[in-house]
């Protein structure tokens, strides 16, 4: 997405509109960077990032109140750039009259929040980062298994949605079916969510579209989750060798993030939901420092050494 409106930011972050409510839809935000205009209040505008949300905390507001009224009005007028989306004031701090006048003159909304400046900045950055990030649409099913985001991929008709339904019945949660919208939140985090039109929906061949939240309750769905593991379902081929010990590490790069991948062969009679659940639990155990494959190899080496001594 190229931009979001100030109105969308207000609704998402829970901001209070102090003034300029008629400009909320007109003003656009095109970057997730937040500016705290401390230097600008001193009159230094050489590198003023006017296209950013301008956040005023205790430091900026207290300094502004100590300025001469004429100087304060001049600086506030300069802060109102053509592309400046809005002013945001934290902690419900008192807003200088000159800021109100300049903002009204240039049609810039002034927003307030009771949150401390650092928390407010982080909250706005997280929201804008998610909305403005580059997105990619992947074919698959995204489920939350014990708070672990698992993306199930595979050819059409291999049984991804049916497996997801079984996982939901076992107490896990659906994020997206068929099409997963993916974006990179930071250097190590990939987030997946459902397109709005497909949210909470699951397609089962022979049954049609079902509403998971309506059938199983609000606890059976999530709006989004970090993707930690990819499980690829592949039709069983007796001529193909699949990993039996779990030491053949695979990775898939999506944007700049590498996600571990496990390939599971599909065959009549295999309970894929239980297998995927076990794979997710085993992956979590590995991230916590326990590797069953390594434990097996250590036991095997110890047995070989013991027999060779005898």
Image (cartoon, rainbow, N blue to C red):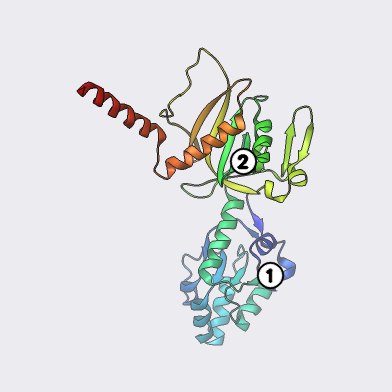
Q: Which is nearer the eye, 140 or 254?
A: 140
Under circle 2, the secondary element is: strand
Q: Is residue 262 left or right of residue 131?
A: left
Q: Position of residue 181 (x, y in %)?
A: 63, 42
Q: Is residue 141 visible?
A: yes
- Relative height, residue 254 to residue 61 (above, below): above
Residue drawn 59% across and 75% down?
77
The mark nearer the N terminus, 1 or 2, is: 1
Q: Which is nearer the eye, 293 or 114?
A: 293
| Residue position for label 1 | 107
Q: Is residue 162 left or right of residue 279?
A: right
Q: Position of residue 44 (x, y in %)?
A: 46, 72
Q: Badge 1, how many Cα within 10 Å: few under 14, some, many 20+?
A: many
Q: Position of residue 76 (x, y in %)?
A: 57, 76
Q: Is residue 109 visible?
A: no
| Residue position for label 2 | 143
């Amino acid at each position: 997405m190229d931009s979001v409106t100030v109105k969308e930011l207000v609704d998402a972050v829970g901001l209070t509109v102090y003034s300029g409510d008629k400009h909320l839809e007109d003003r656009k935000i095109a970057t997730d960077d937040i500016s705290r205009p401390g230097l600008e209040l001193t009159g230094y505008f050489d590198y003023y990032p006017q296209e950013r949300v301008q956040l005023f905390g205790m430091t900026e507001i207290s300094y502004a109140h100590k300025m001469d009224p004429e100087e304060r009005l001049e600086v506030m007028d300069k802060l109102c750039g053509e592309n400046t989306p809005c002013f945001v004031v934290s902690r419900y701090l008192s807003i200088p009259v000159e800021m109100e006048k300049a903002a009204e003159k240039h049609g810039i909304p002034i927003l307030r929040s009771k949150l401390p400046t650092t928390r407010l900045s982080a909250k706005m950055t997280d929201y804008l980062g998610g909305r403005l990030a580059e997105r990619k649409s992947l074919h698959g099913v995204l489920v939350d298994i014990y708070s672990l985001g698992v993306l199930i991929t595979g050819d059409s008709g291999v049984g991804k949605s049916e497996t997801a339904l079984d996982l939901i019945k076992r107490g896990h949660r659906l994020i997206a079916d068929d099409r997963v919208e993916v974006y990179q939140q930071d250097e190590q985090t990939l987030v997946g969510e459902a397109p709005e039109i497909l949210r909470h929906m699951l397609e089962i061949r022979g049954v049609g579209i079902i509403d998971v939240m309506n059938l199983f309750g609000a606890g059976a769905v999530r709006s989004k989750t970090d993707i930690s593991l990819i499980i690829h379902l592949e039709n069983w081929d007796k001529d193909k060798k699949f990993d039996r010990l779990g030491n053949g590490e695979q990775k898939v790069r999506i944007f700049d993030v590498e996600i571990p991948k496990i390939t599971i062969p599909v065959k009549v009679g295999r309970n894929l939901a239980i297998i995927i659940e076990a794979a997710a639990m085993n992956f979590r155990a590995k991230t916590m420092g326990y590797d069953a494959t390594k434990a097996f190899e250590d036991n095997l080496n110890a047995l070989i050494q013991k027999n060779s001594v005898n």
